[in-house]
Image: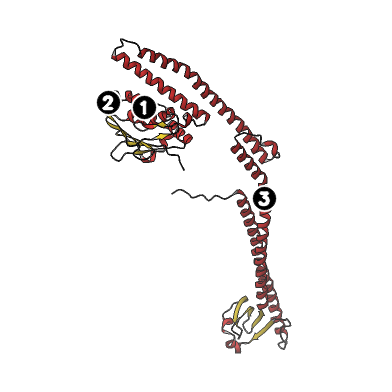
Amino acid sequence: MARIQYRRRLRSRIIISFALFGFALTALFALSAIYLRSYLEDKLIGEALQQNLQGYADAYYRDPTTPGVPFDKIVGYTIGPEKFSNVPFAWRDLPDGVHDLTEPDGRGGRVIYKLAVRKDPQRWFFLKYDTTEERRSQRLLEGALILAVLGFALLSLVIGRWLSSRVMSPVIDLAARVQAIAKSGRPEPLAPHFANDEVGQLAAALDEYARKLTALVERDREFNADVSHELRTPLAVIATTTELLLNAEHLSDKVRERLKRIERASRQSTELTNALLLLSRSERSAPLDGETTDVGKVVEQVIDVYQAHLGRKPVEVKLHVAQSVEVAAPASVVAVALGNLIGNAFKYTQRGEVVVTVGAERGKVTVEDTGPGIKAEDAERLFERGVRGEGATGKGAGLGLAIVRRLCELYDWRVTLAPRPQGGAVATLDFRLRA
């Protein structure tokens, strides 16, 4: 199971981190103060009671008529052997030392006190010190510290918001400038707008990356445009020469068929050149005067061009035109998109049939084959550059479906691949504009 990642804005993370740090720090301080107060109080009171008990016992042995313990909140008890049985039950088995005890106060509450114990063979000495007030003051201190922790946490949150706005201001400015450049499409230097700090270094790195990327895109566009432009002349010569040769008399059927294949290949190359030129410019093109391209006629031409790919394979090609489909795009673009889908079906199908259906659903063309088929989980990956199907044989760069996907993105069409229930694959090209 994939680990779920929770993403927050960087500013929110700074605020939360600062608030948590302030809360943890003050909470740790409060806990330390409470612990130290309790520890020191218990230790000091215990030591004082031990010393007072020692003095109390020594004074008694010197003069049994000693009036008592001359300390506030401390009560002394001296018990002889004849009264050991009168010792409170909770005190009887206590060893020498200082003990924390509680007892009812007669009003439904409890009295918390410390008891210092010294048990001599003939006398037992007890000093009782009431710590109710100390416990009450400790609870008040705890409440005050809790309020202090909450107050400091709130203060940390406020300071965190203020600091985050100061820290994130140049980052937000950088993001806004990058977004503005992305919308306008005109790269502008970012580094001059920022100080020579981490954000300034990031802006400089983005400037350098944008410069290299722009140069690379420009070279790519110029190369594609130059190649497309230069190919038009020899393709036009081939097309014109082929047309003249076809009009010649006394041609054998075999020669005429070969000339037609040259003519079809020339037309296919011209269409592909025009489509690649549109992709290199990332711009659409449509027939002039509001005309549209008849997809059915383009399919017939594409099947005629790619029929030679079947060779002598026992494959039957079927074309069904359920209804007319027209699209506002050049015939060359439609031919390239459909040509790759139909050409793949011819290439991968070794026997059986290839069925091309136009308009079974409004605006759609489907190409079904009885080839080796594809896996449903691999369908989307086949549109990536350089990826070929499992049954691919012979030479190929795996670029055909990638070109189809790019044309669809340019014209807002949809193309999908899926396994065919009865075996093979089905490709669907939907010419309806995406919502």
**Mark nearer the N terminus (1 vs 2):** 1
Q: Label 3 vs label 1: CA separation?
A: 61 Å
Q: Residue 253's image quarter?
A: top left
Q: Residue 427's image quarter?
A: top left
Reading the image, the residue beneath label 1 is 302
- Residue 69 vs 253, above or below: the answer is below
Could you say which is closer to the camera, residue 423 or residue 103? Answer: 423
Q: Which mark is residue 51?
A: none
Q: Secondary structure at mark 1?
A: helix
User: Which numbered mark, 3 or 2, is in the foreground of this view?
Assistant: 2
- Using the rendered image of the protein, determine whether residue 371 is visible from the camera's viewpoint: no
How packed is label 1: few (under 14 Cα within 10 Å), some, or many (20 or more)? many
Residue 90 relative to residue 300: left or right: right
Residue displayed at 64% across by 45% down? 172
User: Which numbered mark, 3 or 1, is in the foreground of this view?
Assistant: 1
Residue displayed at 49% across by 26% down? 277
Q: Residue furthest top?
A: 250
Q: Label 1 vs label 2: CA separation?
A: 18 Å
Could you say which is closer to the camera, residue 242 or residue 410? Answer: 242
Disc 1 marks a residue whose amino acid type is: Val
- Using the rendered image of the protein, determine whether residue 183 is visible from the camera's viewpoint: yes
Disc 2 marks a residue whose amino acid type is: Lys
Tell me where residue 17 appears, x and y as whole percent.
62, 53
Q: Secondary structure at mark 2?
A: loop
Q: Secondary structure at mark 3?
A: helix
Reading the image, the residue beneath label 3 is 165
**Mark nearer the N terminus (3 vs 1):** 3
Reading the image, the residue beneath label 2 is 313
- Residue 43 vs 351, above or below: the answer is below
Could you say which is closer to the camera, residue 326 or residue 393? Answer: 326
